[in-house]
Image (cartoon, rainbow, N blue to C red):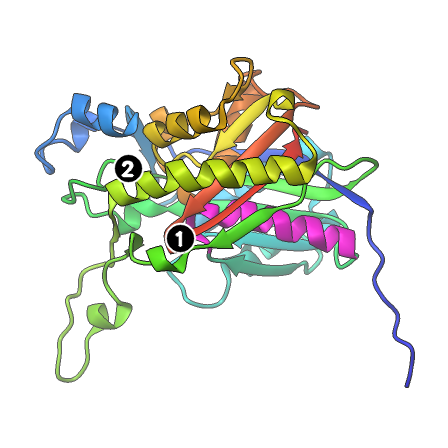
C-alpha cells in the first residue's frame, strides 16, 4: 500500500482582518408601525431596535459581500489572489445552487479559490470561522475568507407583528490565516433540533410554486419565530455555551475585553451578560439598535463597528457567541486583529 502524503498547516490561527457593508436604506420604526399596529416605544422595549438597514435592489448578496471582503483584505494587508478558500454563511441567497461563494471568489479576483456556502442561520459566521481555522491548521488552505451576508428584508413579512421589525440586511467578512500564537480558540458548537420549529421559513418552496393540481401561493416564503420561547432558550442556554467557550480557550471571564453576541435582541444580550456575570469593564456589542438583526452578518458587522469606534482594540480578547434557527449555535474566543 502506497504511503500517502498529508497536508501540514499552521499550529496557530488568527483573524487577520475584518470588513463590513451596511446598506444605504435606513428604515426607522415609524415606517413599520402602522402595518403591525404597534409603536416605536413598543418595538424598542421589546427588541432595543430604533432602526434597521434594508438593501436596495442594487445592493445584492454578491455586491455587499464583495464590499465587506475588500475591507477585510485591506485590514489584513492581503491581496485577493492570496485567498485559498471562500466560505459564505447565508440563508437569503435565493438560488439553491450554485453557491454564491463561487461567484464572489471570482469577482473578488482570487485564483480559483475553493468556495462554498453554509447554512447555519444566525450562527453561520461562527461556524464558518471554526471551519476556516481548522482548514488553516490542517493545511488545506493558508488564508480563508469568511463572509456572513443577508438580505432578510426579502423574506420578512412586514405584516407579522412578531418579526417585521427585527430583520435586516448587511454583510461582514473576516480573513483567517496562520499566526505565531493562538488567536482563535476552540469552537463550542452544537444544535438543539427539538427546537427546530422556533425559528423557520414559514412556506415550503413547493407550496409557493404549486403543481398541476395546485396553483401555489405565489407568495415569497417568510421567516417566522416564536419570540418568547427563543428568548427563554437563548438566555439560559447561550450563557452556558459562552462559559464553555471561555473554559476551552483557557480564558477567565475577568480576562475578557469584548463580548460580541449575535445581535438578535437587546433583551437577550442583556440577559446573557447578567447570566455570565460579565465584569463592568467588558465592552458589549449593541449594534442591533441601529442595524437590526442581520442573522449570519450580525457578528462581523458588530465587531467591525466596535473596532471603528475604538471599543475593540487590536490585541483585545473577544468572545463571540451566536445562535439561530435549528436551533444551531457556536461560540469561540478570538484576539481582535
Which residue is depicted at the point 71% across and 57% down? 111
Residue 74 left/right relative to 229: right
Magenta-colored span: 120-138
Task: Give the residue at mark 2.
Answer: 166
The secondary structure that most of the magenta stretch takes on is helix
- The answer to which of marks 2 and 1 sits earlier in the sequence is 2
Q: Nearer the viewer, residue 150 or 243?
A: 243
Quarter placement of the N terminus: bottom right
Q: Position of residue 284 (x, y in %)?
A: 49, 22
Which dot, 2 or 1, sits closer to the camera? 1
Q: Nearer the viewer, residue 111 or 331?
A: 331
Q: Quadrant of residue 281?
A: top right
Residue 71 vertical position relative to residue 223 in the rendered view, above or below: above
Which residue is depicted at the point 73% across and 50% down? 81
Q: Position of residue 87 (x, y in %)?
A: 58, 53
Which residue is depicted at the point 35% across and 27% down? 266
Examine the rendering and report whether any part of residue 61 can be seen. Answer: yes
Q: Position of residue 148 (x, y in %)?
A: 50, 45
Q: Quadrant of residue 158?
A: top left
Q: Nearer the viewer, residue 37 or 185?
A: 185
Residue 188 left/right relative to 198: right
Q: Position of residue 99 (x, y in %)?
A: 51, 62
Amino acid at each position: 500500500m502506497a504511503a500517502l502524503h498529508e497536508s501540514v498547516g499552521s499550529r496557530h490561527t488568527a483573524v487577520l482582518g475584518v470588513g463590513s457593508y451596511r446598506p444605504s436604506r435606513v428604515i426607522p420604526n415609524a415606517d413599520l408601525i402602522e402595518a403591525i399596529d404597534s409603536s416605536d416605544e413598543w418595538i424598542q422595549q421589546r427588541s432595543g431596535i430604533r432602526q434597521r438597514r434594508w438593501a436596495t435592489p442594487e445592493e445584492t448578496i454578491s455586491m455587499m459581500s464583495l464590499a465587506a471582503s475588500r475591507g477585510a483584505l485591506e485590514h489584513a494587508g492581503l491581496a485577493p489572489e492570496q485567498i485559498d478558500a471562500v466560505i459564505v454563511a447565508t440563508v437569503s441567497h435565493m438560488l439553491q445552487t450554485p453557491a454564491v461563494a463561487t461567484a464572489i471568489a471570482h469577482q473578488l479576483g482570487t485564483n480559483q479559490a475553493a468556495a462554498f456556502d453554509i447554512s447555519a442561520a444566525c450562527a453561520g459566521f461562527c461556524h464558518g470561522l471554526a471551519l476556516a481555522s481548522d482548514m488553516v491548521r490542517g493545511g488545506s488552505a493558508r488564508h480563508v475568507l469568511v463572509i456572513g451576508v443577508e438580505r432578510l428584508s426579502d423574506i420578512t413579512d412586514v405584516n407579522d407583528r412578531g418579526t417585521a421589525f427585527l430583520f435586516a440586511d448587511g454583510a461582514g467578512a473576516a480573513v483567517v490565516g496562520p499566526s505565531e500564537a493562538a488567536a482563535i480558540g476552540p469552537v463550542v458548537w452544537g444544535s438543539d433540533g427539538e427546537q427546530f420549529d422556533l425559528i423557520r421559513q414559514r412556506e415550503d418552496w413547493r407550496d409557493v410554486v404549486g403543481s398541476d393540481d395546485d396553483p401555489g401561493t405565489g407568495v415569497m416564503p417568510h421567516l417566522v419565530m416564536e419570540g418568547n420561547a427563543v428568548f427563554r432558550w437563548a438566555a439560559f442556554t447561550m450563557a452556558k455555551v459562552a462559559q464553555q467557550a471561555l473554559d476551552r480557550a483557557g480564558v477567565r471571564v475577568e480576562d475578557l475585553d469584548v463580548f460580541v453576541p449575535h445581535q438578535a435582541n437587546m433583551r437577550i444580550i442583556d440577559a446573557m451578560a447578567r447570566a455570565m456575570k460579565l465584569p463592568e469593564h467588558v465592552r458589549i456589542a449593541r449594534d442591533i439598535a441601529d442595524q437590526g438583526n442581520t442573522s449570519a452578518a450580525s457578528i462581523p458587522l458588530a465587531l467591525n463597528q466596535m473596532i471603528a469606534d475604538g471599543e475593540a482594540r487590536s490585541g483585545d480578547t473577544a468572545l463571540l457567541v451566536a445562535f439561530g434557527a435549528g436551533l444551531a449555535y457556536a461560540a469561540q474566543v478570538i484576539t481582535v486583529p
